[in-house]
Amino acid sequence: MAADILHEAELILLAAKVKEANQLKEQILIVHQMMRGDIQRPSQYEPGYNTLWDEYRNAIESLRELDPETVDQLKNRVIARVRELEARVNDMCDNRNPGDFDDLKQTLALYEETYDQAVALGWQPHSA
């Protein structure tokens, strides 16, 4: 009985941590879009963007303490997506078509967001 209650409490805590990480990720996506639209360089939104990633990293570390295997699986999926997007961007650059400019911009934005998420999940791209 006590073990069941403890297990249920752990599941509730895990769900809350996942929800927190997902909410931070949504906020990050919004701020990233604002940064891309900002003509000022560096963007005025960059400090907030970096702060949100720090909060996301902290949320992921809390999740890792509760369920390291799931976090590692997510990291591996995100890294695979980064590599897929890299190949797509490279292909778009190698086969330039002026009509594909908007698609290239969107793909680059997605690549930036995915790359940053992979790093926040613990990926070290220069050592991998």
Image (tube, rainbow, N blue to C red):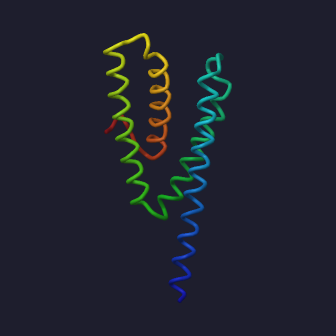
Q: Which image quadrant is residue 52 in?
A: top right
User: Residue most toward the right?
Assistant: 44
User: Residue most toward the bottom?
Assistant: 1
Q: Which residue does the image show at 64% across and 16% down from the upper left?
A: 39
Toward the viewer: 106 or 41?
106
Toward the viewer: 29 or 119?
29
Q: Is 18 situated left or right of 44 in this image?
A: left
- Depicted 94 relative to depicted 30: above or below: above
Q: Position of residue 1 (x, y in %)?
A: 53, 89
User: Residue most toward the top?
Assistant: 98
User: Residue most toward the front?
Assistant: 99
- Depicted 96 relative to depicted 14: above or below: above
Quadrant that contains the C terminus:
top left
Q: Which residue does the image show at 50% across and 84% down from the upper left?
A: 3
Q: Position of residue 80 (x, y in %)?
A: 34, 41
Q: Which residue does the image show at 45% across and 27% down from the upper left?
A: 107
Q: Which image quadrant is residue 118 in?
A: top left
Q: Position of residue 74 (x, y in %)?
A: 42, 51
- Depicted 63 relative to depicted 4: above or below: above
| Number of on-image labels | 0
Q: Which residue does the image show at 54% across and 58% down from the upper left?
A: 62
Toward the viewer: 127 or 8?
8
Q: Position of residue 109 (x, y in %)?
A: 50, 28
